[in-house]
Amino acid sequence: MRTLLMWLLVPLALATIVGAALLYPFGHEQKTGAAIGLHQTPVAAVVTGVAENCGERCVAVTVRMTDGAASGQSVTIPNVKGPGAPSFQLGDEVVLSYAGSQPQAAESYQIVDFQRGWSLAVLALLFAAAVLLLGRWQGLAALGALLLSFVVLVLFVMPSILAGQNPLMVAVVGAGLIMFVVLYLTHGISARTSTAVLGTLVSLALIGVLGALFSALSKLTGLDEDTTNLVTLLGTNIDTRGLLLAGTLIGALGVLDDVTVTQTSAVWELRRANDKLTWRELFAAGSRIGRDHMSSVVNTLVMAYAGAALPLLLAISLAGRSMGEILTSQQIAQEIVRTLVGSIGLVAAIPVTTALAALVAVRQEVAPIAVSEPEPEPEPEPKTVKRAAKAVKPEKPRPARIEGDLFTGYDPDKGPWERPSEPRARRAASARPAPPARRRSSGSP
């Protein structure tokens, strides 16, 4: 069974590596900043004053720049005041956008954001501490896998798509790299992990096929506000529908890992608990566990997409359009396709992974669960009850021991005296003549 898993997964891993080598834009230099028309330069500053003297819906914010060409100098920038506008206080660390040629002029700057690096760093440290506290060495491996996933996204997926590669192919290869690295690094190289990897691959393939099919049937273009801005900045053709499918694959990958690993572990633990279970019994028991998991996972995915699109939902609901028009609009329809296609892949991952895990588990020699014998409880110490000391009575003097034969007396000429045994003494006493009786005198009583 291990050999079969190796023959199935090794070619897929090699194909992933070859695909990454072919899709990576070696030698391509991506233009950024002013080269693509973005002339704004971020500048760090600190708010030193706030005055409401520039108009009814205006507030004058004085900032001191801490970097840039005019570092250390202060400028006063008017900012909008009202609903939805940020409020500033003394000491706030902000980010300015510099787009002029005169660093000392206030007109060259605009307040665009707050600095939040330290708060995010504290949150990241708390997250890492919680993972390490609960997971220990496995938690450390999980943090390493998370870092590697981020590296794959930043150093492979994003540069390849910006260089003009097919977004769907890039997402498939990137998801494969993340899956192999994350699962094997977090859970170790074993038949159990290989089964979860195989189930994840099958589910990803299903999501890709269904996403491509229903995106074409629904005539989704993938053009929303952010995508339109990206195409405008790049100035080149990019497959926006493929970009939509790439986001669907990468978004579903994290939840797929959870489903496949959980189902595989459940089947293995059932096998360890009862090694007499057949493949059908393992599959049935694992499927019952998967049904409970399925309902929560699908709800999680739907809520994740709904939460991301909540401002859009609120804005469309104010347009006074019918529910059918809202659901079939471009922005909402692509979220519906993402959600439903990802959910179908998650639902399919449960029986597929459970069946694969049951096939592998029944052919594996699973070590029995080590049950540690409970330590014997210490015997209770006898309770000592302190009692009042009794008064010691003086011992009475024992009477002197009478030694010798009471009948014949002791004759020193016969040697040391020995007490005769009881039968012998009785026989000697019966054979011995009785002594003559004494006569009593007349004066005795």
Image (cartoon, rainbow, N blue to C red):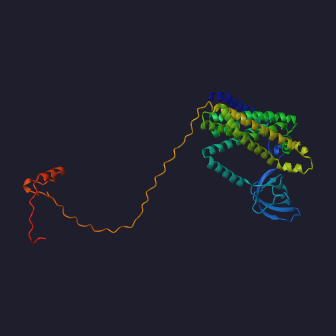
Which quadrant of the view contains residue 60? bottom right
Q: Residue at x 63, y 31 (%)?
A: 362
The quarter of the image holding the N terminus is top right
Image location of residue 431, percent across then percent down: 11, 51
Count of numbered labels shown in the rendering: 0
Q: Residue furthest front?
A: 442
Residue 69 versus residue 254 in the image, above or below: below
Image location of residue 307, percent across then percent down: 80, 48
Image location of residue 82, percent across then percent down: 86, 60
370 sits to left or right of 151:
left
Which quadrant of the view contains residue 76? bottom right
278 sits to left or right of 210:
left
Image location of residue 16, percent across then percent down: 71, 32
Say if residue 230 shows up in the picture.
no
Q: Residue at x 22, y 64 (%)?
A: 398
**Camera-nearest residue between 355 and 425:** 425
**Camera-nearest residue between 55 and 27:** 55
